[in-house]
Amino acid sequence: MSKIKENLLGYEYDHNDWIEPEVHVMVDELIEYQVYCMSLAELTQRVTKQMRDEYYTNSYTEMVQKHKEAFPDEQM
């Protein structure tokens, strides 16, 4: 699998030392299986929720900066 696909599927993460290495492989495979079995609507809903949660944890200053980067022609 390419590094781009691995990153998109979430393979880039910190491993916990207390979990057996085989468990990391099983978790990766189960997540990949679950993602492939999801409908596009369910996948979109989960990603949207995760992104919303991430945005709400940012400070106002960070949000303004990100908004300006995404929508440079808009005035706030």
Image (cartoon, helix red, strand yellow):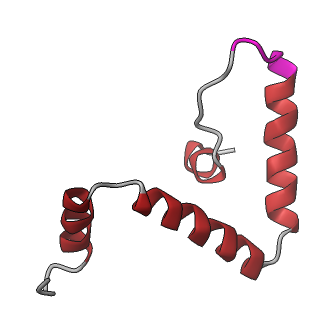
Residue 73 falls within the magenta-colored stretch: no
Q: Which residues are magenta?
A: 17-22
Residue positioned 14% across, 83% down in the render = 76
In the picture shown, does residue 18 fall above or below 56? above
In the picture shown, does residue 41 fall above or below 49? below
Q: How many numbered circles does the render carry? A: 0
Asked whether, in this view, residue 5 is left or right of residue 70, the answer is right
Residue positioned 82% across, 30% down in the render = 25
Which is nearer the eye, 49 or 13? 49
Residue 21 falls within the magenta-colored stretch: yes
Asked whether, in this view, residue 74 is left or right of residue 39, the answer is left
Residue 11 in picture, x, y percent from top left: 65, 40
The image quadrant that residue 47 belongs to is: bottom right
Residue positioned 66% across, 75% down in the render = 44
Which is nearer the eye, 47 or 7? 47
Residue 36 in picture, x, y percent from top left: 83, 63
Residue 67 in picture, x, y percent from top left: 25, 72
The image quadrant that residue 14 belongs to is: top right
Asked whether, in this view, residue 16 is left or right of residue 56, the answer is right
Residue positioned 87% across, 46% down in the render = 30
The image quadrant that residue 24 belongs to is: top right
Residue 73 in picture, x, y percent from top left: 13, 86
> Dominant secondary structure of the magenta stretch?
loop
What is the quadrant of the N terminus in the image? Answer: top right
Asked whether, in this view, residue 10 is left or right of residue 66, the answer is right
